[in-house]
């Protein structure tokens, strides 16, 4: 057992780097991050001010790395970080932060607050202060291969189902394919139409692709709980599979944090560059669209909107691509207030959805999303993250709102033109 | 003006919506670097305040300060809010004249003794008994001393009132002095500038009305919120200064490229004011944006500081060896501290135990 206060503190001291030091130094205490955080705006409780969630880490930085802090510590005037304090901070760091990154976006001095929350979680989990729900999910991810407990047999059953439905072959473990598709466990378990959808799209666009039996799970609970050790293990599985199959690209699924874990954190976690490129499924579809390989016919007249997953827009910069695709098939597409890079989180990102304790709070702060939706009166929400999708469905249900939620890839696949399919093949 | 109206009622009469009013409060909070939450506090307080009595005395001045406040932004909310104080005496703006005007001043001084805000623009000549500037037969000196006695606080508007300004420049034939040279027993706030930025004048008044006290001041008695930084530090041409790119004449390539005007005498580095951020004419621009250097009008004795077009002095003595030694000592210290910190970080990382899945399981 290595989780202990001392281990947590050592981890945090190791995590504090030059950006962190400069962020803490340059914070002007303006409070703008509070107004950017839905946990503050929807509760009005100042303890949810994003930078405040880092208070133990800030003190540690001060005590260990600054002149006056060191002096104060020497003469015994500083307040040490204790187990009790970390216990108090656990809900702030995990339950009331979805790593959505809106605070980082608005900070006038450019402090990347969410970058530091991620570091703070390293210390929390190392000191044994991670929520039970997330611990369970991470444990399942490491031991069973998926936080939701789906395994290769589940995937094979879904592949069989998709093949029957589409009449096409779903490639598994094809060596030398260009693209390796990764899925999120929710897509294997619940939103399994996605497998048929990409199979049909890739067939039409003549994309050489495959799934991997030893690297199909894209979600990364290690990132959410905040353990680089475990996150590296999970990313490593995908990297090994991609290297085994010698693919040129790995496709991140419709899942926000899987994209972040693979595209941005991945190489840092395993400590070397990837020999392949990572692309989000929506980025790929938009590339196929602009090169004319993706052809649709017919439109859906339903009044619909697009929910931007936080990790896609703020970390990922994937903003125009989903809109290009929406405009192909949805003439009555309307934007929510504050769309794109400013969009509000569904409330369940960053591991909050796996953390049962956070559920009442998550339901409370859904009021922000509700207000956005109330302003536009749509019948359907389209999104590109299966976790957002589940959280939206849950929030809509709790608020008795009659709105359908679908994935963007599926929407596109529904309008795939049959003629083009024949031509391409 | 009606006595018992609140500010909000009066604004509504003037056709100013609550929304514009709240925007004004938020802008004021931002300008004064107050936390965002104080915008609502400002709004709540301002909406309720009864208009305090203000007496504005104009002495040896050019009326530029009044022009700045009333003309350049009129009719925006800034000027309206000024209308919201009960301006009981201002000899440029008031309708009354002669004895009636002086009567209004005396009445206000009596009725609001100890409560009114005294605004002064212009310097006060004290040579030869102060005979060089008189109003209604009384010297400025006499009038100021009398009016100051019953004032809650004094706001010296413009560089003349704050520091003596142009009348005080050499050889100062009238013996002109600043308000703070004569009054020692009242809180004085200097809003310097020739003229000062209108939003700075209204900002200070809003602060006073909201919090009932004057804002934090610098060593020259100016509000830190507006005078805390130099023009140079916030100048959009600062990157050119850092790169050593200077305009040498007003029509050379550097000038056309918008390079730094330091060598053309810009006083930005020694001038504390908010021009570079708040700007002029409703946020349109400020002098450096028009291609002319800062003349340093918000600093004491700026008229006597040499030509507006002479560059600020660069050090002539041999500071380089001292600077080199200091740099070396600094670098050595920084490297040492850095090494210690890095050592600590490495040690922490090494003593950290790797997290395994077993650590996630309960006892």
Image: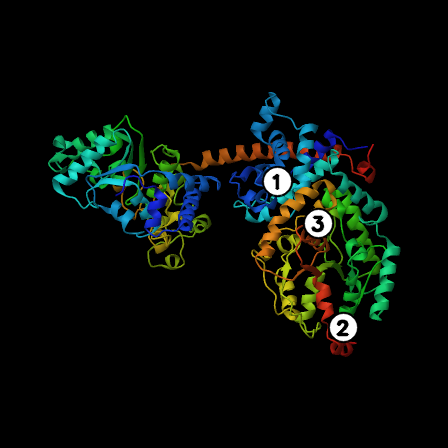
Q: Residue furthest front?
A: A400
Is the residue marked by circle 1 packed among few (<14), some (14-19), or many (20+) residues within 10 Å? many
Image mark 2: chain: A
Residue B75 visible to the viewer? yes
Q: Residue furthest left?
A: B137
Do marks 1 and 2 share a chain?
yes
> Along the polypeptide, which appears first: circle 3 or circle 1?
1
Query: How crowded is the residue under tag 2: few (<14 C-alpha within 10 Å), some, or many (20+)?
Result: many
Same chain under badges 2 and 3? The reply is: yes
Residue A103: x %, y % from top left: 58, 46
Tell me whether circle 1 and circle 2 mark residues in contact (CB < 8 Å): no
Circle 2 sits on which residue?
A204
Report how far apart the C-alphas of labels 2 and 3 lie in the structure. Answer: 32 Å
Q: Report helix, strand or loop for mark 3.
A: helix
Give the percent coordinates (x, y) of residue A421: 76, 75
Q: State if disc 3 and disc 2 touch (CB < 8 Å).
A: no
Relative placement, left or right, of A354 versus A317 is right
Subunit of label 1: A
Determine the secondary structure under disc 2.
helix
Q: Which mark is residue A20?
A: 1
Q: Comparing marks 1 and 2, which lies closer to the viewer?
A: 2
Can you name the residue that lies furthest to the top here?
A: A75
Question: Does residue B5 sit above or below A192 in this rendering?
Answer: above
Asked if B287 appears above or below B204 in the picture, the reply is below
Disc on res. B361? none
Q: Quadrant of the N terminus of chain B?
A: top left
Q: Residue at x 72, y 64 (%)?
A: A409
Residue located beneath label 3 in the image? A265
């Amino acid at each position: 057992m290595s989780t202990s206060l001392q281990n947590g503190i050592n981890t945090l001291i190791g995590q504090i780097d030059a950006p962190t030091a400069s962020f803490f130094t340059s914070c002007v205490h303006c409070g703008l991050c509070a107004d950017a955080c839905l946990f503050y705006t929807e509760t009005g409780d100042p303890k949810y001010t994003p930078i405040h969630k880092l208070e133990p880490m800030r003190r540690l930085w001060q005590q260990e790395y600054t002149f006056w802090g060191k002096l104060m510590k020497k003469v015994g005037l500083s307040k040490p970080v204790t187990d009790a304090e970390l216990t108090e901070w656990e809900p702030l760091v995990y339950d009331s932060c979805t790593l959505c990154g809106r605070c980082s976006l608005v900070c006038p001095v450019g402090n990347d607050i969410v970058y530091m929350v991620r570091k703070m979680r390293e210390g929390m989990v190392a000191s044994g202060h991670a929520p039970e729900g997330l611990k369970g999910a991470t444990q399942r991810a490491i031991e069973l291969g998926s936080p939701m407990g789906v395994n290769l047999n589940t995937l094979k059953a879904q592949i069989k189902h998709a093949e029957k439905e589409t009449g096409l072959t779903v490639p598994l473990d094809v060596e030398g394919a260009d693209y390796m598709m990764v899925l999120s466990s929710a897509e294997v378990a619940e939103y399994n139409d996605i497998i048929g959808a990409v199979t049909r799209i890739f067939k039409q666009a003549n994309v050489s692709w495959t799934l991997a039996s030893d690297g199909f799970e894209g979600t990364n609970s290690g990132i959410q709980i905040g353990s680089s050790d475990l996150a590296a293990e999970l990313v490593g599985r995908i990297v090994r599979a991609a290297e085994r199959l010698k693919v040129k690209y790995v496709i991140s699924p419709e899942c926000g944090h899987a994209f972040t874990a693979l595209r941005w954190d991945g190489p840092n976690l395993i400590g070397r560059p990837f020999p392949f490129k990572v692309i989000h499924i929506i980025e790929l579809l938009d590339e196929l669209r602009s090169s004319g390989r993706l052809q649709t016919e017919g439109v859906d007249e339903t009044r619909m909107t697009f929910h931007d997953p936080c990790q896609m827009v703020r970390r990922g910069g994937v903003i125009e691509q989903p809109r290009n695709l929406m405009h192909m098939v949805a003439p009555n597409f309307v934007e929510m207030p504050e769309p794109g890079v400013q969009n509000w989180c569904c409330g369940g990102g960053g591991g909050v959805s796996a953390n049962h304790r956070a559920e009442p709070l998550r339901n409370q702060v859904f009021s922000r999303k509700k207000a956005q939706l109330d302003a536009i009166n749509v019948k359907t929400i389209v999104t590109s993250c299966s976790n957002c999708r589940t959280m939206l469905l849950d929030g809509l249900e709790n608020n008795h709102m009659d709105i359908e939620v679908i994935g963007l890839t599926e929407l596109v696949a529904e309008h795939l033109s049959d003629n083009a399919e024949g031509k391409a093949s | 003006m009606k006595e018992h109206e609140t500010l909000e009622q009066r604004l509504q009469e003037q056709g100013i919506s609550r929304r514009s009013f709240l925007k004004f409060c938020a802008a004021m909070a931002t300008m004064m670097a107050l936390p965002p939450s104080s915008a609502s506090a400002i709004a709540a307080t301002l909406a309720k305040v009864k208009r305090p009595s203000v007496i504005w005395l104009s002495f040896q001045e050019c009326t530029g300060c009044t022009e700045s406040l009333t003309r350049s932004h009129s009719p925006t909310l800034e000027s309206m809010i000024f209308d919201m104080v009960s301006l009981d005496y201002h000899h440029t703006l008031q309708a009354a004249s002669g004895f009636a005007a002086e009567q209004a001043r005396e009445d206000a001084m009596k009725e609001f003794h100890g409560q009114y805000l005294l605004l002064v623009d212009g310097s006060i000549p004290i040579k030869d008994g102060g005979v060089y500037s008189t109003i209604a037969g009384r010297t400025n000196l006499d009038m100021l001393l009398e009016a100051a006695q019953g004032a809650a606080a004094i706001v010296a508007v413009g560089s003349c009132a704050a520091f003596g300004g142009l009348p005080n420049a050499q050889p100062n034939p009238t013996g002109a002095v600043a308000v703070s040279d004569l009054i020692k027993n009242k809180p004085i706030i200097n809003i310097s500038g020739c003229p000062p930025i209108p939003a700075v004048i209204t900002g200070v008044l809003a602060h006073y009305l909201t919090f009932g006290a004057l804002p934090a001041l610098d060593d020259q008695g100016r509000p830190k919120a507006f005078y805390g930084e130099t023009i140079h530090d916030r100048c959009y041409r600062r990157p050119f200064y850092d790169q050593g790119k200077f305009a040498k004449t007003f029509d050379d390539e550097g000038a056309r490229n918008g390079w730094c005007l330091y060598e053309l005498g810009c006083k930005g580095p020694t001038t504390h004011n908010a021009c570079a951020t708040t700007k002029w004419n409703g946020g349109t621009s400020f002098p450096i944006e028009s291609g002319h250097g800062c003349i340093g009008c918000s600093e004491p004795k700026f008229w006597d500081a040499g030509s507006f077009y002479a560059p600020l002095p660069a050090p002539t003595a041999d500071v380089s060896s001292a600077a080199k030694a200091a740099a070396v000592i600094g670098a050595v210290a920084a490297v040492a501290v850095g090494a210690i910190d890095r050592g600590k970080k490495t040690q922490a990382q090494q003593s950290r135990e790797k997290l395994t899945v077993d650590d996630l399981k309960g006892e």
